[in-house]
């Protein structure tokens, strides 16, 4: 059962008794879990890595924790057309991936649930975060050093006063080194880095 937060409104007469003043509880903020690009192509498809495969179970558990609390969950889906190789991204990364409608483009089965929100994303960073009126954000998914960092910094820019966390145990990078470097960069930019699960060494 979720704990109820009680707010006592204070009239001017009560100000002589500061013990009656209850601070606004940060826990009243809407919580949002943002799940970046957990698509087959980034897990074990065109751009898959063993580190990405290794976080799938953690991601599943984290989503369940948010879902069980009734919190908001937003999935992003990297999306390209058949002309991908002609795009700027394609010229720099000539590996066709996440072509709309393909299996590689699909979000990993078993992650999305009823009531979750979903955005199609055609570049690294999604620029429409303002529509969600975010109040407290945790970001997980793939890849740490490309789309996770891009979206974390866009959200920091749009919402400088809200807590923004990246859960490193539910993220993987293009390489382990790139993952660590991106975590350092985000930490410098005051994104809180958390580890909610221990990594299973045998999976790495
Ligand atoms: Zn892409």
Image (spheres, helix red, strand yellow):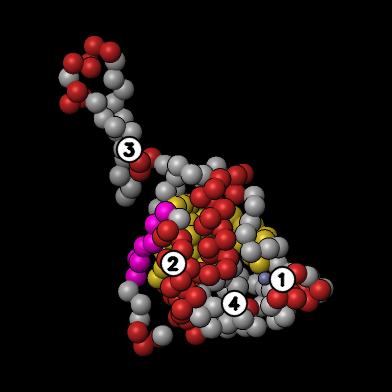
Q: Are marks 4 and 1 in contact (CB under 8 Å)?
A: no
Quadrant containing the C terminus is bottom left
Relative image position of residue 42 (x, y in whole percent) = 59, 77
Q: What is the quadrant of residue 82 in the picture?
A: bottom right
Q: Nearer the viewer, residue 148 or 189?
A: 189
Spatial separation of the CA atoms under disc 3 and disc 1: 43 Å
The alpha-carbon separation of the residues under discs 3 and 2 comes to 29 Å
Residue designated by label 2: 183
Residue sitting at x 53%, y 83%: 49
- Ligand 1 position by quadrant: bottom right
* Secondary structure mostly taken by the magenta-highlighted segment of the chain: loop
Q: Residue 62 got which mark?
A: none
Which callout, 3 or 1, points at the residue further toward the start of the chain? 3
The CA distance from mark 2 to mark 1 is 23 Å
Q: Is residue 143 left or right of residue 106?
A: left
Q: Which residue is mark 3?
A: 25
* Disc 4 target residue: 42
What segment carries the magenta color?
190-197
Which label lies toward us, 2 or 4?
2
Is ligand 1 within 8 Å of the beta carbon of the residue shown at mark 1?
yes
| Ligand 1 within 8 angstroms of badge 2 C-beta | no
Q: Position of residue 104 (x, y in %)?
A: 66, 78
- Whether label 3 touches label 1, CB < 8 Å: no
Q: Tag 1: Cα neighbours inside 10 Å, few (<14), some, or many (≥20)?
A: some
Identify the mark nearer the N-term, 2 or 4: 4
Say whether disc 4 or disc 1 marks the residue closer to the N-terminus. 4
Q: Where does residue 171 sit, x and y in percent of width and height?
A: 47, 70
Q: Earlier in the sequence, mark 2 or mark 1?
A: 1
């Amino acid at each position: 059962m979720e704990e109820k937060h009680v707010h006592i409104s204070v009239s001017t007469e009560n100000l002589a008794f500061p013990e009656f003043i209850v601070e606004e509880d940060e826990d009243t903020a809407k919580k949002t879990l943002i799940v970046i690009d957990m698509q087959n192509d980034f897990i074990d498809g065109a751009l898959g890595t063993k580190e990405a495969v290794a976080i799938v179970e953690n991601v599943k558990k984290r989503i369940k924790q948010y879902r069980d609390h009734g919190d908001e969950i937003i999935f992003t889906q990297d999306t390209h057309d058949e002309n991908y190789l002609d795009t700027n991204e394609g010229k720099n990364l000539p590996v066709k991936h996440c072509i709309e409608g393909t299996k590689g483009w699909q979000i990993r089965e078993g992650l999305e649930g009823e009531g979750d929100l979903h955005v199609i994303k055609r570049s690294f960073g999604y620029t429409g975060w303002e529509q969600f009126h975010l109040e407290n954000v945790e970001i997980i998914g793939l890849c740490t050093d490309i789309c996770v960092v891009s979206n974390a910094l866009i959200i920091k820019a749009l919402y400088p006063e809200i807590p923004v966390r990246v859960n490193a145990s539910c993220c993987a990078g293009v390489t382990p080194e790139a993952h660590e470097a991106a975590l350092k960069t985000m930490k410098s930019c005051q994104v809180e880095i958390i580890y909610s699960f221990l990594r299973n060494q045998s999976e790495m």
